[in-house]
Structures are given as structure tokens and as C-alpha cells.
Amino acid sequence: MKLCGVAFCFLVAVAFAAPANVKIGANQWTVKSSDVCPADYHVPTLNEWTDLSKSLIGKKQKNARAKFAAGKKTLYFKLDGSENVIAYNPTTAQITTLQLPKKKKLETRCAKKRDLLAEHGVFDGKYLDKRNGRSYPVRVLGSKLWLSENLSVKVDSKGKGAKSADLKNCYLESAEFCEDFGRYYTWQEAKKACPAGWHLPGDAEWRDYQKNLTQSDWKNIGRGGVRTWDSYGDTSNSGYYWSSASTSKSTARGWSFTQSSKYVERDDFERSTGMYVRCVTDL
């Protein structure tokens, strides 16, 4: 069974079944005791135990703490590079280092580094949107993972990929431009457009995205323009993007990137305006 928290993961032993992954933070852990760590795993260090302990504190992690202890009170685990052991309290998630108490059984948990990109469906630097088979390069920015190209998939009201190739949201209603620029979305469409596990960036996420403009891909993000009613604006020099922030009953927050001047502007737009979508997810 899968147990995930703010930061790590473990293997929970399930009777007559292969153990599942439990992921907390940067590591993946085994919960089943092992004399020898499996391939790619290692005996955790004190720093890794400390990170695990911090990640399991709080009411939301109560079940994860209990599963990790497998119903026992205090557990004693082998510590890498030390004759001391880790004593783990499943009630508080606190750890202490000490010499192994007499008559206490020493267990071993194993850990390995997580592949965060693979967990988000990114392989060879690209994310595959299974709704229409299109792949998008990605960009890691702090604790966020961004698609580096504009979304180009028609979706229904539930966010599922539509079968028909409707071109009305493409520049000049041309499939070529939907392939090159991406699709225009109204704000209501944009909120449902991102694939499962991804979301339309919030206003704060866009703020963080554009803080370091020296790393911006201006030739990519600063083009495609905007669609207002039946007209198009500045397709060769600027790109307009929705955020998830609503500013009134008829408007929502958007961001525009101008390639020639390397300028970013934040403004409110009518929700019916056709703008682009860049999806983001938390690492």
C-alpha cells in the first residue's frame, strides 16, 4: 500500500503481497526489515533519519508513522557508519541515537534516492500527455516542475482529451499553428486543461517563474499572441498565459511575456479571452 507525505517514501509489508512504496521527501524507504539492503538501496545515514523524522511530524502523518512501526512501540534500527542505533518512536516520530539496549532486537530499514521526474511521468526530459500522445519538454524551477511548451490538447468539461480535432482555438484556425504555438483556452477551459497530477499555475507560481528572466526561453514563451473575439494580437512577439487566480466574476489574472523587450506584465483579462496554458506540478 502506498503511503506518501510531504517529503519521503517507504515499503509497507502486506501479508502475501509484494511490499508497496512509501515515499517521504527525497528518499524511498523499506518498512520490511532486511538483513541486506536490496539493489539500489543503502543503510540510511543519520541525516536521512533526521529528514524522515521531520517529515512524519503532525496529525496528517499519523497513519504513516504507525505503518512504519508495524504496530510496535519503539524500534531500533541500524545506522550507517556508526556503532550506535536509531531509536524510533512511532507516536511522535522522534528519533534518538544510542547504544543498542540489552535484549532489544536490531532491525534494518533501507533507503534509496527517489527519481522525482519519473514519478511525474517524465522520461528523457519529456512528459507524455496520454490524452493526445503529445510530448512536452519540462523545466525544474525550485520545487516546481513546469511544462516548457504551451499545452495543445482539446479537453471536455471533465478535462479528458476530446476525440475531435477542433481547430477553432488555433491561431488562424490552423492545425499547424496549434502544433507550433499551442491552443488558445478561455479561462474556464484552462482550469480543466492540465493532465492529471498537473495544474494551472497560480498567481504566486507565475511570480516565482518569472523572477529570473535570464533563464526564460523568450523565443518559446514570447510568441503566439492572444485571441480576443475573432482577432489575434502580436503573435510573433508576445505570449499570454492564464493563471488560476480569479479577480472578479468576469475577469481572471493573466501574464504576458514580450520577446523583443524582455518584458513581463501581469494583468486582468476577460475570461472569454483566448490565452495559453503552461501546466505545473509540485516535486
Image (cartoon, rainbow, N blue to C red):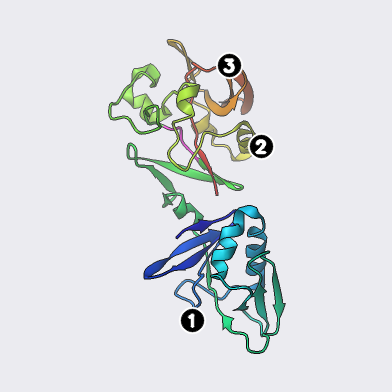
Callout 2 crowding tier (Cα within 10 Å): few <14, some 14–19, many ≥20: few
| Kind of residue at disc 2 | Lys
Name the quarter where the N terminus is drawn. Answer: bottom left
Q: Residue at x 33, y 26 (%)?
A: 176
Q: Which residue is mark 3?
A: 249
Is residue 148 highlighted in magenta? yes
The residue mark sitting in front, 1 or 2, is 1
Q: Residue at x 52, y 31 (%)?
A: 221
| Kind of residue at disc 1 | Val
Q: Which residue is mark 2?
A: 211
Against 219, residue 231 (above or below) is above
| Residue 17 in view in this figure | yes
Q: Which quarter of the figure has residue 53? A: bottom right
The residue mark sitting in front, 3 or 2, is 3
Q: CA distance from mark 3 to mark 1?
A: 60 Å
Label disc, if present, on residue 36 of the rendered structure? 1
Q: Which residues are magenta?
A: 147-151
Against 43, residue 153 (above or below) is above
| Kind of residue at disc 3 | Lys
Considering every residue shown, the one lying at the far bottom of the view is 102
